[in-house]
Image (cartoon, rainbow, N blue to C red):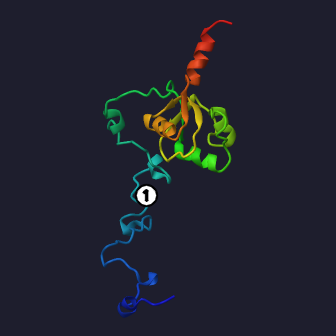
Amino acid sequence: MACIPELTAIGAMKLNEISDNPGAHDRAKRVGRGIGSGKGKTAARGGKGQTARSGVALNGFEGGQTPLHRRLPKRGFNNSVFCNDFKRVNLGRLQMALDGGKLKDESTIDGQALVACGILRRLGDGVRLLAKGEIRTAITIEVTGASKAAIAAVESVGGKVILRANRAKKRKTEAATPA
């Protein structure tokens, strides 16, 4: 390893020589070391009780005052229980699978094929195709949804995107229709 001339002239910084500026750091007050120290007996923790013990942090407790998280109004709502769980697949990831031989471009690629080749772990409520990355192979893919850019990219190389209803809607309609 060659020496850098600027560092040798100044003197290279060594980890064992690094220190704070004088007065930048006060030593910790040693508590519980007798009456004469002024911080003896209870060690500045007050009397007995929960906060006199070790390992106590009453999160959000403000000494009896209504805490901030209760003073502020509630806002908005969360509808995540009812929203559809679409799995996202990018074009670049599809191209990687095609190049690696995990996917075949001869047949229609659907959700089950994506799970079988390892691109997706599970289907959720359907697959949504997104345009990140580039696709060079003409494929026919069957998905629940796709961005306009993804559809344009697939069709520009001679492929085809088939849009199908999502799985959650199918399950609801199947449950509603009597057998």
Question: Where residue 131 sits in the image (x, y, percent)?
Answer: 47, 41
Instruction: Note whether 54 is above or below 62 in the view shown.
Output: below
Q: Residues within 10 Å of mark 1 (few under 14, many from 20)?
A: some
Q: Is residue 49 visible?
A: no
Q: Residue at x 55, y 33 (%)?
A: 160
For the residue pair 89 and 86, the one nearer the viewer reads as 89
Compared with 35, 86 (above or below) is: above
Residue 35 appears in which quarter of the rendering? bottom left
Point 62% across, 40% down: residue = 120
Q: Please count the marks in the image.
A: 1
Asked if residue 60 is positioned above or below residue 25 in the image, the reply reads above
Q: Position of residue 109 (x, y in %)?
A: 63, 35
Report the residue marked by disc 1: 42
Q: Position of residue 143 (x, y in %)?
A: 56, 30
Q: Quadrant of the C terminus?
A: top right
What residue is rendered at 50% in x and 36% in y? 155
Residue 21 visible from this viewpoint: yes
Q: Residue at x 45, y 26 (%)?
A: 79
Task: Determine the image quadrant of residue 39.
Answer: bottom left
* Residue 78 position in % (x across, y down): 43, 28
